[in-house]
Amino acid sequence: MVDIECFRSQGYVVVPGAVSENLVDAVFDGVEKFCGVELDDPLTWTSIVTQKNGLPELTGAGMVELYHHPSMWALRQSPEIYSAFAQIWEHEALWVSIDRCNLNIPQRIKDDFEGFVHWDVDTSVDPLPFSLQGFVALTACDVGGGGFQCVPGMPARLREWIKTQPETRNPFRPDLNGLEVVEIPVKKGDLLIWNSLLPHGTAVNTSCVPRLVQYLSMAPAQEDDLTLKNWRVHAWQNRLAPEGDAFPGDPRKWEQQNGITVELTELGRKLLGLDPWMVNDHEVKRRGNQKCGAPGF
């Protein structure tokens, strides 16, 4: 069960042990193979290459341009993860994001990343949007381990805070003066879900071990948008990255050359959009932004 009160008051919630160790380890192994490293051998970490990102703060942040590994789809189809998002949305007909992993290696190996805090949604619009983001922790990550950092409680007071800011403020990058940025520790297999109005980002890894997560979110399905639905199915079939500046993709096209199109469960087919959701004998129609990628429906 999700601690809804924590989510409402703090803007995020950790669902402990949402994913089994076997599922987590499979993604871990997939990332190792994709990156050509052994994550328990620091001598291999210097070979990790991350692509220049259209969002400057993500360059050097350790984004892994792997999207369709079978183990990643196994997490996306997890009934436990689906249940958590459905509880927050109070809605059953959801689509899952097609997103990547983050591998944040220690600063002593990679000293070009300073951490960041941002929004993935435009906080200048009225009304303010509501959406969810999240990840599954593939490794335990304590404070200082290069994990998730945020300004707790900000979504609940964002409207009032905006009134104190100049009209020229950056709606995607908060002025952190006077705000407390906190790192949120997680254990292997935990699911962390946050409100997109929560200022958040990745911290500098001052530990001795890598931090690894799989980004994963869900939002109400948009089954009346055939262009969007067809793109999602096409991306799954052909193992393609999302479109948009924040998703440079893998120039090696490793997944296209070495991967497979994953067979989906009944739940997974609905979460992709391959099969329709039926609620009270009617197809559910909702808005989404998955073609532009995630995080940030």
Image: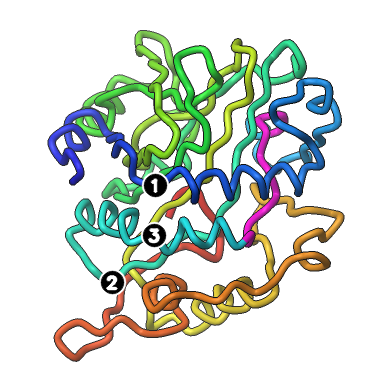
Amino acid type, label 1:
Val
> Residue sitting at 49 percent across and 51 percent down?
23
Callout 3 environment at 10 Å: few (<14), some (14 to 19), or many (20+)?
some
Q: How many marks?
A: 3
Q: Secondary structure at mark 2?
A: loop
The numbered dot on residue 94 is none
Percent of width and height locating residue 95? 39, 67
Percent of width and height locating residue 171? 45, 35
Q: Which residues are magenta?
A: 59-69
Q: Which residue is mark 1?
A: 19
Amino acid type, label 2:
Ala
60 magenta-colored:
yes
Q: Earlier in the sequence, mark 1 or mark 3?
A: 1
Left or right of 166? Residue 226 is right
Q: Which residue is mark 3?
A: 78
Mark 2 and mark 1 in contact? Answer it, CB < 8 Å.
no
Q: Which residue is mark 2?
A: 93
Dividing the picture into quadrants, the one containing residue 194 is: top left
Mark 1 and mark 3 in contact? Answer it, CB < 8 Å.
yes
